[in-house]
Amino acid sequence: MALRTILEYPDPRLRTRAQPVTRFDAALGTLIDDMFETMYGAPGIGLAATQVDVHQRLIVIDISPERNQPLTIINPQILTREGEASTEEGCLSVPGIFDEVKRAAKIRLRAQDRDGNLFERDFEDILAVCIQHEMDHLEGKLFVDYLSDLKRERIRKKLEKERKERATGATATGAGPPAGARRAY
Ligand code: GNR
Ligand code: NI
């Protein structure tokens, strides 16, 4: 098992559209195991292969507090959507940013499991939201795309600044605007 590096916005690789999984082999099993390890380590409740720079239609999810309900979803298709729910979302590829996104409250999903077996299942609440968030990743879409251009630009600048500071070992102390003039993003 191995941890994989999670790509961060605005990395252009996050905009790649993923291709269907066609080989349900040992390499796929290793990728799935690595994705769970990476998701649990982060920690997060879901992870799309896109986020670890693998552009295949594969998602792992575990919303349980005990971290013992792993769900592997491959080649997912939403068959039906019902209702609307607004949730404060976050994303491991957009660290430290949280905002409300509206999505379907319930979905019926057709997908394959890690052995390639087809299944259909209904999901609701946070699980439905998480699946829609992950399926967006497979299309190269991020939750910040639902926010205003102004908010998204602020988020991009904040994350680019943080990335630069990490790279140079610089900190935010001293220079920059006084604390009161700083925005959350
Ligand atoms: O860990 C995560 N939490 C979360 C919270 C609300 C809505 C969606 C998510 S998914 C996110 C992990 C992630 O970035 N998956 O792509
Ligand atoms: Ni995400």
Image (tube, rainbow, N blue to C red):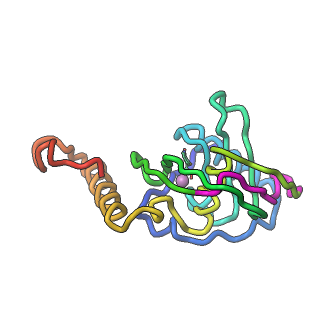
Residue sitting at x 70%, y 45%: 33
Depth check: 132 or 3 in front? 132
Residue sitting at x 71%, y 50%: 32
Q: In the picture provided, is 54 more to the left or to the right than 116?
A: left
Q: In the picture provided, is 108 more to the left or to the right than 92?
A: right
Q: In the picture provided, is 114 more to the left or to the right than 12?
A: right
Q: How many numbered marks appear? A: 0
Q: Position of residue 40 (x, y in %)?
A: 59, 38
Q: Does 42 lie within the magenta span? A: no
Answer yes or no: is residue 178 visible: yes
Q: Position of residue 71 (x, y in %)?
A: 74, 45
Answer yes or no: is residue 75 visible: no
Residue sitting at x 88%, y 58%: 118
Q: Position of residue 60 (x, y in %)?
A: 68, 49
The residue stretch that appears in magenta: 103-117
Residue sitting at x 44%, y 53%: 94
Residue at the limit of the structure toward the top, as seen here: 66
Q: In the picture provided, is 100 more to the left or to the right than 69?
A: left
Q: Does 114 lie within the magenta span? A: yes
Q: Position of residue 10 (x, y in %)?
A: 41, 64
Depth check: 13 or 75 in front? 75
> Which quarter of the rendering shows the N terminus?
top right
